Image (cartoon, rainbow, N blue to C red):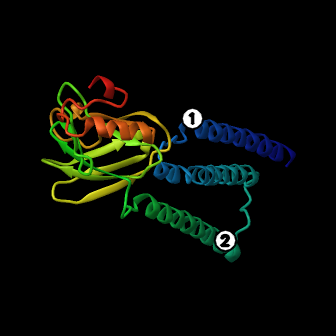
Amino acid sequence: MRLGAAVTTRVGGLVGALLATAAVGGCSRVRPDPVTEQGDRFASLWPLFVSLGVAVVALIWALTIWSVVRYRRRSDAVPGQRQENRRLEVLYTVVPVLTVALLFGLSVSAEEEITAVSSDPDVRVEVIGFQWQWQFRYPDEDIVVSGTPDQAATLVLPVGRTAQLRLVSEDVNHSFWVPRFLSKRDLIPGVRNEIDVTPTETGTWAGRCAEYCGLDHWRMYFEVQVVDPEEYDRWVQAAAGADSTDVPLPGEESGS
């Protein structure tokens, strides 16, 4: 009995330490680092989901090790038989159902916030995907930014303002994906698709088409440049009416 208890304690402690190390390392290295309000809402679920996942794995390991050690074979005698334990059965049925219901409710609430679109956004942009590049049209500002096989298009957005992106495909299915936005949405011919994006940091972020769309799918990359509202307003004045393949980037207005 003492040997069994000692083994259980040591193995349980080792498993617990390994799980804690994995959880801490995983959260610090893999946790999303979004740069939009919508991405922040998604990332807010991360600690809870990871913690519950680690807790479930730890419980399973603990019960497994305890059962192996506690009920290991000691003799040829037939162990005691018990057909049911209703309290335990109710417990391990109700707890998972309540846990799944909680996670489902939180996910639905977050999804509604993330996918909601404003009736009066600060910026409107038509994001057009075609084989094999991107075009960004600002209908209210008379700006069109077109990518070419040799030059990727740049989507310019102001920080702290809500930009509504209308996603349009001119040929086949594409997918608008900016990893740091924690947002990916398909462009499907004939289907109206819109998302709101509210950047929280300035910087330049990589974007890709995440839907295989043909031989040169790899060429469908673009950039998102998020700037201060004042710099964005200056860029709008300089870029309005410019040639779609020669629109100056923010900071280049004086030389345009």
Relative to 27, is 237 on the left or the right? left
Dot 2: element? helix
**Residue that badge 2 annotates:** 91
Q: Position of residue 151 (x, y in %)?
A: 22, 27
- Most extreme residue toward the left, as rendered? 171
- Most extreme residue toward the right, as rendered? 2
C-alpha distance separating marks 1 and 2? 35 Å
Amino acid tagged 1: Arg
Q: Nearer the viewer, mark 1 or mark 2?
A: 1
Q: Position of residue 67 (x, y in %)?
A: 70, 54
Relative to 256, is 17 on the left or the right? right
Q: Nearer the viewer, residue 16 or 45?
A: 45
Dot 1: element? helix
Residue 243 position by quadrant: top left
Q: Nearer the viewer, residue 245 or 235?
A: 235
Relative to 178, is 89 on the left or the right? right
**Residue that badge 1 annotates:** 29
* Neighbours of disc 2 within 10 Å: few (<14), some (14-19), many (20+): few
* Neighbours of disc 1 within 10 Å: few (<14), some (14-19), many (20+): few
Amino acid tagged 2: Leu
Q: Nearer the viewer, residue 254 or 187?
A: 254
Q: Position of residue 165 (x, y in %)?
A: 31, 51
Residue 31 position by quadrant: top right
Q: Position of residue 171 (x, y in %)?
A: 12, 47
Evaluate if marks 1 and 2 touch, with contact meaning CB atoms under 8 Å apart: no
The residue at 15%/34% (across/down) is: 215
